[in-house]
Image: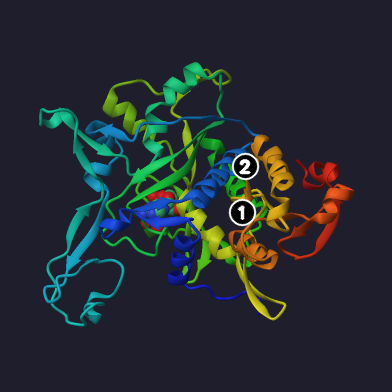
Amino acid sequence: MPSDTKLTLDALVSFCKRRGFVYQSSDIYGGLNGVYDFGHLGTLMKRNIRDLWIQSLRNKKGEIVQLEGSLLGPEAVWEASVHVPGFHDPMVDCKECKKRFRADEFDLKKGCPSCGKNNWTDIREFNMMFKTQLGAMENASSTAYLRPETAQAIFINFKNVLSTSRVKIPFGIAQMGKAFRNEITPKQFLFRMREFEQMEIEWFCKGSEAPEDLAFWIEHRLLFYKTLGINPDKIRIREHESDELAHYSTSCVDVEYEFPFGWKELEGIAHRGNFDLTQHSKHSGKDLNVFDEETRESYIPHVVEASVGTDRLFLTLLFDAYHEDEIENETRVVLKLHPAIAPIKIAFMPLTKKLEEPTKALYEFYAQKGISVQYDVSGSIGKRYRRQDEIGTPFCITYDFESEQDNCVTIRNRDTTLQERIAIEKLPEYLGI
Ligand code: ATP
């Protein structure tokens, strides 16, 4: 079977459920549209993605500090960021079948994608923020919103960070966390969700340096995807046309991945000018200038932003890693995940139940070191290998009767399926642990 087996979205959704990566949220109550829960393997994999992302931000130009902002924000923040007046998608309803659509996603003249009729309501603007109320009193000052992006928490904490972290321009503030958008039509599984996670870096620099820093970050982010082993033929950079740019953005590119449903945005990288800090300075009345020691002038820094959805990257990595090949006349599913992304690093297997005790001792030794390991005793060794291949475990270690005598085990490689005999004491060195 060729390694570029086409995996459909539906097949990936059921694979994720069957192997405990991702479940539809509130499944037993019929499911909540656009919202998902991550199972054991999904949770482990997502944590690996976050760790690698934060590591990947290290760079020679400037420091990166972290922030974990709140999910709720008062109306004033979202007024200043222009989300209250401007975070809209155009919405339209089919009067015949009553289905609701985003009006900018297809040609209305061609009729309803669901029933084919051509009888539409007017197009209305729909604000995608989730509005809520703080406390028991309902008035304008108690209105709050779940954040539709993580970035604003960074901008409103800019002065706090600057005065407490000993950082100097240029530097970056990185944040990962939940964001919420009331998408009119959530779809394509983890691609477009209503509750999702973002990993964002806001890089503060002088306006004159911003174009160069934007180019630097585009290269730096592409290197990240290369390091993760994503097929380079499926990653590309697309520059935004001038009519696509957000009102605040001076230039912007998307890192796109070729999903089975087409080339789509994975990450957005933009020069946002100094729009955000200027807005928050105006609306809050606080001075968000920094002082340039060289020119003896105050200025509001510019921002280069790189923003990727953790879940969207998770989906990308699964699509990219999923392969089917032929082994001993059997089709095997194998997730060729980068070992650092793989949820389980090593599976330990006794050849038979009689050998459980020494195998478990070995398993415990690695589990105690904090390594993500699994123990599997059920079924033939071949079946156990397949189970691990399917979830992307790079190594399986089998303890057999000979191990009792020679203190060696068999280690089997996920990608090559080759097996080697190796001394137990040499394992850490072999595994690079
Ligand atoms: P799109 O055009 O796909 O709606 P966007 O341009 O609105 O995305 P941004 O606001 O730039 O997205 O958000 C940055 C990143 O956050 C995106 O590149 C994507 O990876 C992720 N993201 C945005 N919206 C969603 C969503 N509804 N579900 C999952 N991830 C999302």
Residue at image point 58% right, 20% down:
294
Near-viewer residue (204 or 18): 18
Label 2, residues with CA under 10 Å away: few <14, some 14-19, many ≥20: some
Q: Which mark is residue 1?
A: none
Q: Which quadrant does the C terminus fall into?
A: top right
- The residue that disc 1 covers is 225
Residue 352 as seen in the image, left or right of residue 174: right
The colour mode here is: rainbow
Residue at 17%, 64% in the rendered image: 123
The part of the image, by quadrant, that contains residue 184 is: bottom left
Secondary structure beneath disc 1?
A: helix
The CB of the residue at mark 2 lies under 8 Å from ligand 1? no
Q: Nearer the viewer, residue 324 or 181?
A: 324
Q: Position of residue 313 (x, y in %)?
A: 51, 54
- Crowding near the residue tagged with mark 1, few <14, some 14–19, many ≥20 C-alpha atoms within 10 Å: some
Which amino acid, by three-letter code, is at mark 2? Answer: Ser
**How far across and down, in percent of the image, does residue 46 sit?**
52, 47
Check disc 2 and report the residue beneath it.
56
Does label 2 or label 1 sit earlier along the sequence?
Answer: 2
Q: Residue at x 20, y 80 (%)?
A: 115
- 268 versus 232 height, above or below: above
Q: Position of residue 207 (x, y in %)?
A: 50, 36
